[in-house]
Structure formats: structure tokens, C-alpha cells
Amino acid sequence: MGSKKSDTLSVYTPTTEYAVATFLAFAPIGVVHSVDFAGFSSESLRDHIRDCKSRALITTVEDRRGRTGNTVSWTKGRDKRWREETIEVPSYYPPEVMSAEDPLFILHVSLWIYRKGVVHIAVGCLLGAPLTVKYASVVHPGRTGSHAWPMSARSPVTCPLLNGVTTTVFESTTIYPIPSRYWQVVEKHKITHFYTALTAILFLRRLGERHTQADLSTARVLAWDWCDEHVEKKQFAIVDTRWHAETGPITITPFPGAFETKPGSATAPFFDIEPVILDPVSDKA
């Protein structure tokens, strides 16, 4: 593709091995990537591409959740097929020397059209975020993590791998093909750490406890209240974490086994974090 350091490319794919390969290919050569959530509209995607001035878009023909077999328009000379483009590519490219402040990826955090992307730098993603995951989730080499909500390369890819942990990625949705999809993945692949979004857990809770039956004996860390009662049945640690797409690393979190935890509380600030509560009217502490 002729991409070089400081170029920006956009990624609009489901959670597949191609998305992971893309993240891992971009970072060492200094190519900035902009990952768009698959739920964004075509208008949002268009404006995000314009916002970060992407040279190309890496995408898929269709997402597995549909597989409708629809015909996809193809523009010769502009559109290229992954397999054809990668067949002649050498297996190794020397990595670029990067500064701690060099941009690593751009994250558009809102469904709003025209919302500007948040630029994350190399040190935040390659050092800060993996460090918070190491202590908040108590991960160690040899563990297996599963992430059910794509947050660019930071959580599902970079954090586990930089901690020597296997990461598990599956294509589909929270409830496809069945509502117990998450827990089947944990059982099948012997997942030890499962990290997901509050919205996903709230959605599953509405479907009832009958979809939570699975062998979760390998799991060590999950995410609170309803899960504590009906999913893991008080067998292992559950933690709440607070972070924003703008911050990168987790900002408030308990350390499993070291903090007394309760539902809805992220407990204490992480290293070097000083939280301040502001009045919504005066904007004063």
C-alpha cells in the first residue's frame, strides 16, 4: 500500500483476525490507525475518514452478523483485495524509531457526525494502558483474555499481548447465534480474564439467568453485580473500572484481592491519578 511513518489509515471491520493483524502491522512502522466502531453510520465513517485524512480504508465486504450475500460495488483501481495485496509482501519490515509523544492511533468516541477524533500517543498505549491492565486485572504470562467490546488496539490487542497474555477475539455479536455466546467462549477457550462493557452486561441481564449456564471454572476476573450473582456465582473476583476513550489507560480501579469491592464502585484512583469532583453549575471543585 506504500504507507509510511505518520500516514493515517482507517479501519472499519468486525472483530476478526484481519483487524488484529492490521493493528499489529501499523504500530511498528509508525502508521497511525483510526478504528471506527462497526455500528457507525456511513455518514459518520465518511466524516471520520476526512477528519484524520486517511490514505486508505481497510474494511470487509460484509459482517458475519448479516451474511446476506448482497452484491457489493467495486471500483477498479481504488478497491483492492486483502489476499491479493498481501501475497507478495515480505514477512518482515524493520520497525521505525518512535518518540513517546508520536501519535499511535485516533479514536472517534461519539456517534455524532463531525465529532473530532482523539489522538493517542505511543507511550500511553504501549506503556500506560498495559500497566493498568496488569494491575487491575492481575494478568500474568500464560493467561487467556477475552474482550467483548472493541476499543481500538488498546484493550483487545495491545494490553494482553504486551503482558504476555493470549487474547481471544470472536466475530459476531453479544447474542449471536445464542445469548450465552460470551460464556460459551469462556468455557471453550478456558478464559481467565473477561473484560466487557456495562451496556453489554445490562443487555444480557434483560434476557434472564437461563442464558448464563456454562463452566467458568477457569475465569478469575469479570465485571460486577448481576454477573456476581448469576454468572460467576461468587466464584472469582469482579472489578469495576473507570476510564474514558480520551484517557487511554484506566483511571480508577480496585486491585483484585487487595481492595474491598462493592457493586457500582471503581474504588480508588490508579497510580499518578488525582480525581477531582466538579460542581456541574460552577465548574469548581
Image (spheres, rainbow, N blue to C red):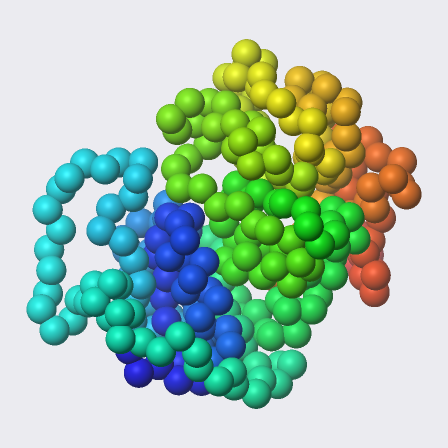
* Res. 57 in view: yes
Q: Position of residue 77 (x, y in %)?
A: 12, 73
Q: Classify the position of the N terminus by image quarter.
A: bottom left
> Which sits in the foreground, 267 or 163?
163
Taking depth in this image into account, of 19 and 106 the one nearest to the observer is 19
Q: Quadrant of residue 134?
A: bottom right
Residue visible at 55% across and 57% down in the picture: 157
268 left or right of 190 in image: right
The percent coordinates of residue 43 (x first, y second) are 28, 55
Q: Is residue 281 visible?
A: no
Image position, residue 18 (x, y; %): 37, 57
Q: How many labels were placed on the picture? A: 0
Does residue 155 appear left or right of residue 133 in this picture? left
The residue at 78%/37% (across/down) is 265
Determine the image quadrant of residue 67.
top left
Determine whether 142 is above or below 117 in the image: above
- Residue sitting at x 65%, y 53%: 165
Residue lying farthest to the top in this orientation = 210
Which image quarter is the C terminus in? Answer: bottom right
Identity of the residue drawn at 73% across and 36% down: 220
